[in-house]
Image (cartoon, rainbow, N blue to C red):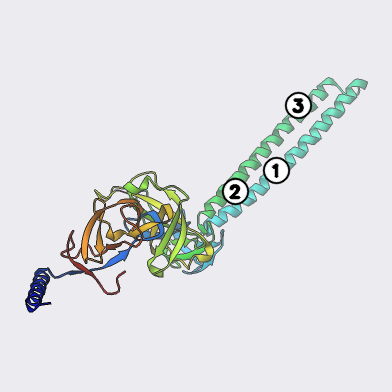
Amino acid sequence: MSRSHKRIIVAALLILLTVVATIQLSRPEPISVTVTAVERGDVEATAANTRAGTVKACRRAGLSPAIGGQITLLPVQEGDRVEAGELLLALWHEDLQAQVVLAEQETEAARARAEAACIQADIARREAQRLQRLEESGAASQERIDQAVSRAKSSRAECASAQASAKVSEARMDVAGATLARTLLLAPFAGVVAEINGELNEYVTPSPPGIATLQAIDLIDNSCFFVAAPIDEVDAAAVAVDMPARISLDAYRGEQFPGRVRRIADYVLDREKQARTVDIEVAFGDPQQTPRLLAGYSADAEIILSAHGDVLRIPTVAVMEGPRVMLYDADNEVLKLRDIKTGISNWDYTEILEGLEAGDRVVTSLDRPGVEDGAYAVAETGAQ
């Protein structure tokens, strides 16, 4: 090769290097992005509460005596477990107890009078029957027989009257007992005494109509709990009773507990305008997996509307309006906008029906400045 040819080749290489260097220098600084690979896995469509839900006991009652009075007996303390029918509180009732005793004695006397009247009626009936048999032999006059029959009828009426009076006395005794019972507060179900508003010798007054006052005793059945939470009215139509759900509790961070939808409210709440919600109730599932719960815990409920297994999926944060994604071309270090077709989704993953293949890498840091179609980019260290 002649010296002139070598000079031409060297000059051409220098020009090429100059052009490449110029291009590299004029090329914009690449932006740093986080990416993730399209993979196969499970995707669920879910509906979640719009505001924090609340753990509630299946049975909870604010109890107070039916009448006002002075507390003379308070055998329970806050935190005590009681059985159904156990005495929780008693008001002063000596006067009512005396009325019960009086009613019992009056009832006993009325029963005795009824018994005596009925015995007399039976004697009069047998006497009338005996005289009627003697009439055949002429040993008894018709007048005497008529008198005996009349006495028998009268005695029978007196017996019936005395029995009715005895029943009235029994009813009066029941009334006295019911009045006395209103001074006793009994547990309607087994549970734990959560709160007591009252002390011995204090006077309690029942709530007047339309005016709420503190209940004397707050009783909670701590054997059964559920989560009550509001969901957006848009999601309510897709929710059905007995759908599976996952429950999260602030008190047990990082844990989720299985549940089932047990109730959907029959109306929409519009207390917050433009944020209409429907209340749902989710019961806890396996008792063995349910932790120790307290009524009032804050909770979230995620209802599983449908589930697809072994499908293409990407993080939901990578999906743009359209729907579209920002694809990362690792070979050319450039971003490419691509249209996709999606299926079901949740906060974590979105199902991909068309537009992507397993292994494609999509950008998840869409909120960073400069992330746009055709932009130069580099994947952050450690990104997929």
Residue at horizontal 71%, vertical 45%? 112
Where residue 15 sits, quadrant-wise, is bottom left
Q: Is residue 64 visible?
A: no
Secondary structure, mark 2, is helix
Rendered location of residue 97, percent (x, y): 56, 57
Residue type pointed to by label 2: Met
Residue at horizontal 53%, vertical 65%? 288
Residue at horizontal 22%, vertical 59%? 336
Q: Residues within 10 Å of mark 1 (few under 14, many from 20)?
A: some
Q: Which residue is mark 1?
A: 113
- The disc, 1 or 3, on the residue closer to the chain's N-terminal end is 1
Q: Which residue is mark 2?
A: 173
- The disc, 1 or 2, on the residue closer to the chain's N-terminal end is 1
Secondary structure, mark 1, is helix
Residue at horizontal 50%, vertical 65%? 289
Q: Gap between marks 1 and 2, in whole Å?
A: 17 Å
Residue type pointed to by label 3: Ser
Rendered location of residue 241, percent (x, y): 46, 48
Q: Does residue 69 appear to the left or right of 169 in the view shown?
A: left
Secondary structure, mark 3, is helix
Q: Which residue is mark 3?
A: 150
Rendered location of residue 184, percent (x, y): 52, 58
